[in-house]
Each structure stands twice: as structure tokens, then as C-alpha cells.
Image: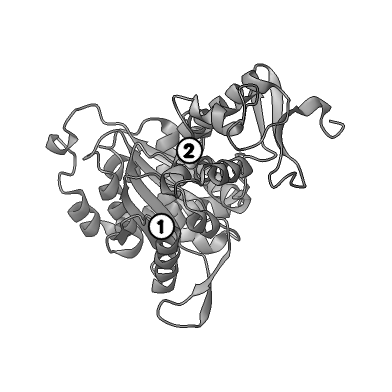
Amino acid sequence: MIDDNVFVDYEFASEADKANAWALLLLGFMRNMINGPTPIHWLDKSTPGAGASLLADVVSLIQTGADMPKETAPTTEDEWRKKITAALLSGSPYVCFDNVSKGLDSQAIAAAVTSTYWSDRRLGASETVRVPVVQTFVVTANNLNASNEMMRRLVRIRIDVSTEHPEMRTGFKHPRLKEWVEENRPELVRACLTVIQSWVANGMAKGSKRKGSYEAWVDVMGGVLENAGIRAFLDNEAEVAASDESLEATRGFVAAWWEAVGSARVRARYGKSASEIGLLDIMDDLDTKPAEYLEKATRAKPGAETTVMGTYAGLIRDRVFRIDGKDLRVRRSTKASNGSQWWWLEERDSADGK
């Protein structure tokens, strides 16, 4: 019923993307069976007009009988926080940011989708509210550029259309899909509940896949889908990680750092002589800079370059990167020397006795 009617005309990039679409659809019916946070469902598309927003509406129509409420993505942390608070207080089962075009990198939404409760000041009042996070988060975007911290919180559902103007396509099984879904909603709801009940009747076995921070969600959704014979759930995780432009740019920075000074200690600032190299010198020489660094650099006031570099380096502090066959950990001194701290790369095999 679902595959042959709802998903039939969608050109999913892989079976994994389609399986993840199933996970999004079923989650609305069984969110209270998951004791923990759930990730952001990323409806990705290769070009505008591919139908990502329509798919979001169809999923919501089946579960609630109404279109999915949508918001534009904020541009500041304060706006993110306010919109998330308002959405969680609204009672809607979905929080959807539609057509995200300027990248996704927010501490607020990152915290919301890895927490079971959200606390914030109510808009226009002095009181602080604390609400459970039980909504399903969705973003739609055309080739989304997300930070590494956000990428690991996403589950990709990519629609990869094979025409330059997808909005002009014809020959759909259901040309007015939303109308068809509304007319056939009882049967579609029954189909979803049948899939879930079959898993319950067969013992509610946990799924075999894993995703950090979302163990309860993976156990339940993976179990349901595997019981239904849908086994490609999350099989695109490695592909998504490999295509993470921000991670690749960060790895490029660390590789340049290692090539320039090896394990020698450096400061975040520019070098003060021809023989001294700082992290800013290394960053300036890169053709492609990490998105997290650029985001902070473009907003910084003149003269704040060292602060920006130190803040960015702090984001990757203690992380390990595989460079030239070596596992390199980013290290920082615990105490400042002459007003600034030292940074260096440490081979992991010799670090901390490992």
C-alpha cells in the first residue's frame, strides 16, 4: 500500500534512503514507544522541485490528517532557540524547517535533538519552561551543507531526480498525491499500524543497526523495519559521512597543520616572525576552509582573528583525525602562557599510553 502508492513515484537515491523514509513515516505512530531522542530527518534533494516538501506533507497527512507545519530556518542562535521553544510548546508532532539554504549549524537544535527535555525562557515572559522533546524533527534542503556536529544528528532521505525540471514531470500514478492520501487515509493508517503490530506480535526484537546518541530510536525503528523485510535502514550512513564537506575541510586543515609543523607546538595567532608559524597562517593558506571556521570568521569584528581561530580549534580539541596513515589527536595546553595557549598534534598510539 505504501510502496505501491505513496513512495512509487519518488526516485530515492538508494534503498537506504527509501528505508529511512519508512522510518520517518512510522515514527509518528510510535514515538511514545521510544524512550530517548530521535534524529533530524533530512529530506535531501538534488534539485528544487524534487518533491521533498510534498513528501513531508504526505507523511504528516497520513499520521495527523494535516500538512506538516513548516518554518524557515533562523540565522542566529537566539532565533533558533526561540523557534524551537515555540514549536515544542505548540503541541504539533512535527518540527520542520523547510528549504534550508544557508547551511545547518546550530547549538540549539543540536541540543534539542539529543535531549529528552528542553528548557528555555518563554517568549515575552520571565518564566522558564521545561517541556519534553517528543516531536519529530525534519529539514528539507537542496544539497544541505551542515556542520560535522549536525551531520551525525541527521538521517538522510535523498530524492535524486533524473530530469533538469522535475516540476514539469508527468505520468505519476497519483498526479494529485495529497488528495489521494486524504481520500485513502484510513487504509494508509491501517497499513502503517499493521507493520508495527506485526513487529509487536513477533516479540519486538531490537534492530541490528547502530547510531550514536539515538540507541533507543535505532532499536525500535530498526526492529520494526527489519521485521517488515526492510533491511537497508541507515545503510547510507557511511556515504553521508564521506560526503561531509565540513569534515573533509577540517581534515584538510589538520593535514596542512601536520605537514607544516608536525607535532611542534603552535599558537592560534599569526606567527610573529618568518620562522614562526601559527594556526592562522596555516588556515590562510587553505583553498577550502571549514564551514565552522568561516561562519565565525565572517561574523567576527576586525582584530578578532586570533579569538576566532582559538574558538574553532576548541571545537576540534581532542578529536582524532586519520592523516597519512597516522591517528592524530588535536591537543591544547591546560594553562595559558603569556596570554595564549599552545596547540599541537599528537600521534594517538603514543598518547596517554594508548
- What label sits on residue 2 in the rendered view? none
Q: How many circles with numbers are drawn on the protein?
A: 2
Marks 2, 1: nearer the viewer: 1
Determine the residue positioned at 37% across, 36% down: 158
Is 195 on the left-hand or right-hand side of 8?
Answer: right
Q: Is residue 29 above or below residue 344?
A: below
Residue extending furthest top? 324
Image coordinates of residue 101 in percent, x first then y, are: 32, 44
Asked if residue 183 lies left or right of residue 300, the reply is left
Which residue type does callout 1 highlight?
Thr
Count residues near mark 2 (Cα–Cα under 10 Å), then give few for <14, some for 14-19, many for 20+.
some
Asked which quadrant contains residue 179, the reply is: bottom left
Q: Position of residue 233 (x, y in %)?
A: 50, 38
> In the structure shown, which secondary structural element does the residue marked by tag 2 occupy?
loop
Left or right: 353 as drawn, with respect to 241: right
- Closest to the observer, 2 or 247: 247
Residue furthest bottom in the image: 126
Rounded to the nearest angstrom, the CA distance separating label 2 from label 1 is: 39 Å
Q: Which residue is mark 1?
A: 76
Q: Indicate the position of residue 335 as horizontal and vertical percent values.
A: 77, 47
**Looking at this view, is 191 or 167 the one in front?**
167
Q: Residue at x 28, y 58 (%)?
A: 185
Please give the name of the residue rendered at 65% of the width and 22% of the height, measured from the top-left corner.
275
Q: Is residue 1 visible?
A: no
> What colour-coding does the image apply?
one colour
**Residue under pointer 2:** 230
Q: What residue is at 52 percent from the left and 77 percent from the top?
A: 129
